[in-house]
Amino acid sequence: MSDALALATVSSALRRRVLSAAVTAVPDAVVRLGTPTAKLAEDNDAMVNIHLYRVEPNGSHANTHFPTRSGKGEALGPARLALDLHYIFSFYGDAEDLVPERIMAQVMLALEKVPLLTHDTITAAIADNPELTESDLADALSQVHISRELMSIDDFSKVWSIFYQVPYALSLAYRMSHVAIETEDTAKIGMPVTRTGLLVTPLSKLRLDGVSGASRKSAPITWNAEIAIAGSGLSADGSAFVIDGLDFDITGASISDERLIVALEAARLGGQELAVGAHAMRVLAPLPPGSAPHLRTGSDSVMFALVPTITISAVSATGGGATRNGVVDIAVEPSVLEEQSAALLLDSRDAANPLQVRLTADIASVVFPTAALSFPFADLPPGDYLARLDIDGFVSPVAVVEDPASPNRGEIAGPLVSVA
């Protein structure tokens, strides 16, 4: 592997290789690095112009290195790139003396005879350029190979079209493969293995299919309410449930092989309250006797969303006429954290005047985590409003009329905020 100076070193070493071949054909020939220009054709000097016009990942070595990050995002070692460098060689000189053809043939033979950049060539190129003093390409384990690229007339016309108003010159295409570069990060050295052994454990048949509210599959999941866990092998003796790395006690829960009904509450999580948001659940298989704990098998993780629930504590309103000013106080569970954003959505129940208002919580004197929030409002028309709490995009559920005998069955009933 090499440092970031490798690309410039390859171009410099290639110029040196081509120059040694070009002067064999035409003693006063020179080699230039850079984009072809119209002036080169006008000057008509014996010259080879070398232009790096494309850099691409090397397909064979792009993934040969180890991961550079751990599962936690920690750096494990240097980041690496395996690249192919694509060059255009353009040949200039007196056409009457066939200078372009003579130089081109000599260069092609030289690169065919030794199709790589040797250690001596790279070392000499570094010595020629003070800017490359720190380059370590000469010490790289892999060699840079040189190969012709077969390009049709159409290919050349596309390449030369990017050189604005530059007349075409006799040209060849070459590829340098592969050039490996890496950062200067030091790789971490793992701890040695002090003891080897063989442990045989049965394959786990545990499977989690989903988590939902207990009433129905589409029911939202709320705090201090029952949830339904669906899967396979859930009733196996010795299985353990985990939520976000916390042990989830299912003692006394209603359980079968494919379904588990249990309350989602702090008492089952060692007193820990979950926050509103996304959480991961996993079930672990029983640990065979004598097995190492870190080899315990289990199901894949299943994500579920915990949404807030609210109760309207008080509504105060002042003012007369068409609008009111006031405050809506609510109780919320689970508690809201300081880093979470909370907004109260009020939707007018007046079909003739649909209106949605988004209120921001007053947190000036709030001590987090909090189970109570206040939302001031201004210029709000009197009436009934459906209230929903939005915490970081997770919105509290609404109450729906469930009575089969009610003519309003299925309609949204609350929670309501009445502004008088």
Image (spheres, grey):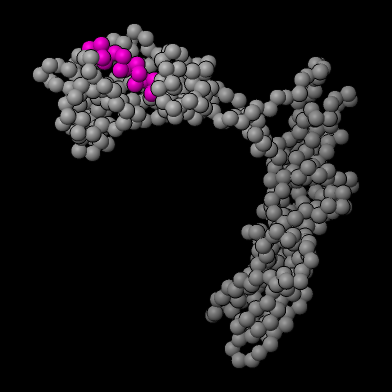
Would residue 384 be counted in the magenta stretch?
no
Left or right: 138 with respect to 221? left
Question: Which residue lies at the image location 72% right of the left edge and 45% below the top edge?
Answer: 280
Q: Residue at x 55, y 76 (%)?
A: 354
Judge whether 332 appears above or below 271 on screen: below
Judge from the rendering whether residue 350 lies leftward or rightward of residue 311; answer left or right. Answer: left
Q: Nearer the viewer, residue 53 or 212?
A: 53
Q: Residue drawn 27% across and 36% down? A: 162
- Which residue is at a point 77% across and 20% down the rendered structure image? 192
**Residue 151: x %, y % from top left:** 27, 23
The number of callouts visible is 0
> Farthest top residue?
113
User: Looking at the rendering, which quadrant does residue 189 occupy?
Assistant: top right
Segment tinted magenta in the rendering: 12-25
- Taking depth in this image into account, of 297 and 270 the one nearest to the observer is 270
Q: Is residue 39 left or right of residue 223?
A: left
Where, quadrant-wise, is the C terminus in this rendering?
A: bottom right
Residue 200 x %, y % = 80, 19
Q: Position of residue 116 (x, y in %)?
A: 40, 14
Please state the horizontal and vertical placement of residue 50, each as a whole percent of the image. Answer: 30, 25
